[in-house]
Image (tube, rainbow, N blue to C red):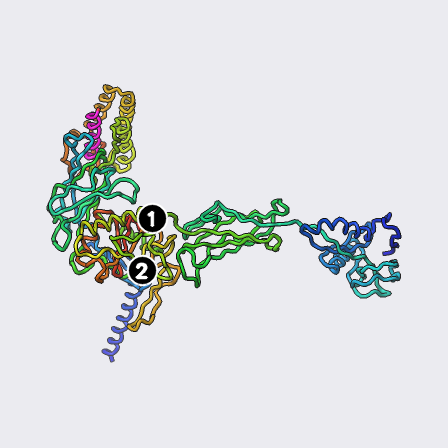
Amino acid sequence: MKHHRVFCSTFWCRHFHPISLLFLLFAFKISDLQAATTQEYIAWYWQDFPSGVGPTADQACIDLAAKMTALGFPRSFHAIVASPSEVSYPCSDDFLYVNYPVCELTSDGGPPSLYSCTDHAYVYSVVVNTPECSIHLSGPGGTNGALVDVEPGREVGGLRADVTCDGVPTSKEVVLTVKVDANTGGHNHVPSRPDGSLSPRDGSSPLTFSFVAPLPAGDHSITARCADNSCGLDTGKVWVGIHGLVNIPSSGFWNLYGDTGIHPAGHYLTGDAFGKLMDLAQLYTQVYFPLNTPVLQLNDASLVRGGVFDIDWVSRDAQGNIIARRTEWWTPPHKEHQRGVVIDIQANGSATAIPRRNFRDFEFLMRNRLGMTWLYHDGHYHVRLLGVAQ
Amino acid sequence: MKNTRSIVQGFMLCVCLAASFAVAAEQESIVVDSNGDYVITYKSYLGWQKVTWVPATKINPTVKGVVRAVTGKPDNLSYNYTVLNGKDSRQFLVGLNLLASNVLSPDARSPDGWSGGAALDRASGSGFIVGWSPWPPGDSRPDGLKPGAAVSGFGFDSKDLPGIGKIRLYGEIWSDPNVNPNNFPDEGPDEDSPIYAEFIRITNHNDFIARLAAVPHVSVPVPFNAAVVLANIQKHLDTDLVSMKLVDPAIVAQMDPWFATAIDAAKRNSTAGLRNALQELRRLLKQECADVDQEGNETDTDDKPVSPARIAKLAARVLNFDLKYVGSRI
């Protein structure tokens, strides 16, 4: 390509000149340096020619070469060089008295030669404003500022991830992750604890998604970010559990036992179930067996927020060594014991348990007088205080 | 040689049979044995289990109820029941209970050898469970009601009018005081087991025999308000009795307009209009059931309409009692 380009001797050129542009851009960009900004490189060839643009000088040159090729002047980026002071052959590209780095573009991508056209373009950097983007999680609202509450094993929707750039809602690819918070929901054991799941886990904002709670109660933290990491991140919690459970207090009608370091609070019931327990205990100790009978020994009910009440059921040999593991943490059994309406009452023949001679009448009391049902197993009555198996 | 071959063949046959039996046995199931007990086979975290569940349903009872106003206390109604354990029952009858919308005391009247009382029905959130057990507690069997025997004297007082409700009756499952019946080694079938729903139905939801009887159901406000009570009676008729198939919707369609008339008259304090409407309602009932005014004479067929009647006798008598009571309070 033959043309003549002249370095302007005056500050403002008749022709649109990159040096002027550079100064102008620099002047405007000072004020913008305090906002979100990025650096860009411009490869300027000619006033009527599209410029190359890129995050680096090389990329700007490559972009320019592609644009020249598209316009019928096949060029490839060779190198960035100090401004040549001579006309290059054979395409007579004048480049005089310029001290800036330039793209060297040749028709074959190799160094300038007698057999290829060479063009040069100014390359310089500019600072441009980039929009400030942020991501925000929202939901219907829940306990202690959570995004939402949901019962164990259930799914809840209405969760959203929104991206705004400079305050304007913007569509960007969003990525979501979720992780259960350790030692929440009444479980003080960690390994292999299941996380909740999200559906979908990614997509374009505004992204509406749902959360599926695992069986154990607890808190789960959701993190949202843009796929290109351009909008920071936001986190929010999901509260998983059953509301309204009350802790069985100490009483002269019963004795509480069974709390462990792993499950330090396993005596929670609904208000109605607790009322039935009171009825049962009062009738048992004051009416049915007021003399010489131990009070009821109350073992597992539900955890503080309900959900699966997992136990480590093992078989042991005579020396106490574990010979078989029957259950897995985070899964039933216990079966039931999840919604605060069931409790285990000791009946194993020990000195503090319900005496065997009382079993039949205890069953009459539960069923006939109070409408309860039960399952007798492993030396205890698994009592369904409201007559439902939950 | 022949003997050896036949021995080998016999051995192989035994092995095959044993293997096929093993395969057939490893399936969860609930079957009823010759005693009428449920044999429950399931797999748990302890391996394959087989547990026999003795149901409390091997009884064929009858319940007769009588409701009377309490002399000198117009707000109080006395509910009284006689229970018969059928001759063909295979268990002693050792318990009964019912749901009542209201009771006036936590104590219940009981025949000799029994004790009863009322407790809040916290499962439903309203009403009371009134139940009875053999008394005194302790190993004093046989107690309860033997097959063929009857006993009267179960009762309590309420301010609410009778409707039709279920009385649950329970048979004796303890055959040996030293052996727990229905003793599971674990928590039973898993919730995702194909037999779980049936297991819960048998062991939790339906382990009793139910009989219909007059129980407190129609709420009576204090002070007495005829319009409210009539509306409550009508609601019981239109919804509960129809859904229990104790009354043909055709007769409900005949009675509803008279209920509307009666309620309107009550609101307008028109005693004459109210009495007239009540008379018409009772006349409709008498058309269906000639002895509707008799009390305490229910038969075994009282829980369903007997053609050509379009309402079960028990339902007709209960409704008639309610309407008569409203008339007595105006």
> Which residue is nearer to you in this view: A210 or B134?
B134
Residue A60 location in percent, x, y? Answer: 75, 57
> Which residue is nearer to you in this view: B26 or B188?
B188
The C terminus of chain B appears in which quarter of the rendering? top left
What residue sits 43% from the left and 52% below the top? A240
Chain for disc number 2: A
Q: Disc 1 to disc 2, how far (Cα)?
A: 19 Å
Which of the 4 image quarters holds residue A103? bottom right
> Which residue is nearer to you in this view: A37 or A261?
A261
A3 in relation to B287, above or below: below
Q: Say whether residue B102 is visible.
A: yes
Number of the label disc, if any, that sits on residue A270: 1
Chain for disc number 1: A
Q: Is residue B322 rendered magenta in the image?
A: yes
A275 in relation to B221, above or below: below
Magenta range is B312-329
Q: In this view, does A212 lie to the left or right of A347?
A: right
- Quick one: label 1 or label 2, which is nearer the N terminus? 2
Q: Is residue A349 rendered magenta in the image?
A: no
Mark 2, residue position: A258
Q: Is the magenta stretch mostly helix, strand or loop?
A: helix
Could you tell me the amino acid type at mark 2?
Answer: Gly
Residue A133 location in percent, x, y? Answer: 62, 50
Q: Is residue B40 left or right of residue A220?
A: left
Q: Tag 1's secondary structure?
A: loop
Q: In this view, does A40 lie to the left or right of A201?
A: right
